[in-house]
Image (cartoon, grey):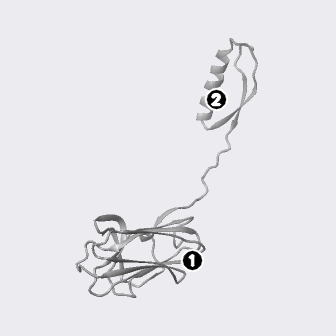
Amino acid sequence: MTTGGSGHWKWISAALGVALAGGTAVLISELRDTGEPPATEVLPATLPTSTPPGEQWYDLTAHEPVESGGGQEVLPTVGIGKQSYPRGLRGSGVAPDNYRSWLVKGRCSRLSVWVGKDATSTAGGGAGQFVIKTDGVEIATRQASAGDAPQHVEIALADVDLLTLQDVRGARDADNAWGSPRVYCAAAPGE
């Protein structure tokens, strides 16, 4: 190839830019310094038509629990301390009614949630306990009192079929709150 062939390189760059931008692959079969554009063959790209499903975050409050004690309610926002969280649960019943369980069928790897006392609760005192269970076994517990800062809980889930969020409070205690409870899963809970 001669040094005066810069026009050929511009042609190749332009052809590659146009062909690749159009979603096709370009095979350059021969480069020659003939003064003519290089011979090319355009092949269809072998791009997948859809991306295989991967893990993503799922909001637990957007999915129906398989079991519920009736003492928790879903809220569009929940306040814990001075923080506000999109979507949450408020436990206003008395134990053991404050629980919800979701079927995750071993497809989830993590749980992430904020816990503490509900900032809008009419009762002002008391301590609350937040219990996370997998397949009926307690794996994590947190305690919070009115005025405490929110606590972030992140739990690894492995081979779990049933995930339960339960909170315990006395009848005169401030309501408990679960802020933005979500799971990282290959498929939505309960599906």
In this rendered view, identify the residue nearer to me: 58 or 51: 58
Q: Quadrant of residue 20?
A: top right
Measured from the top left, where is residue 159 in percent x and y?
A: 60, 74
Q: Dots 2 and 1: beta carbons under 8 Å?
A: no
Amino acid type at circle 1 is Asp
| Mark 2 → mark 1, Cα distance in angstroms | 50 Å
Which of the numbered marks, if any, corresponds to residue 161? Answer: 1
Measured from the top left, where is residue 182 in percent x and y?
A: 45, 67
Q: Is residue 131 left or right of residue 34?
A: left
Quadrant position of the C terminus in the picture? bottom right
> In the rendered image of this protein, does residue 96 appear above or below residue 46?
below
What residue is drawn where x is 68% and y is 44%? Answer: 46
Measured from the top left, where is residue 22 in percent x and y?
A: 59, 35
- Residue at image mark 2: 16
* Secondary structure of residue under mark 1: loop
Amino acid type at circle 2 is Leu
* Secondary structure of residue under mark 2: helix
Measured from the top left, where is residue 106 in percent x and y?
A: 59, 72
In this rendered view, identify the residue nearer to me: 54 or 23: 54
Q: Quadrant of residue 125?
A: bottom left
Which of the numbered marks, if any, corresponds to residue 25? Answer: none
Q: Earlier in the sequence, mark 2 or mark 1?
A: 2
In this rendered view, identify the residue nearer to me: 40 or 159: 159
Give the mark toward the camera: 2 or 1: 1
Classify 10 Å Cα crowding around label 2: few (below 14), some (14-19), many (20 and above): some
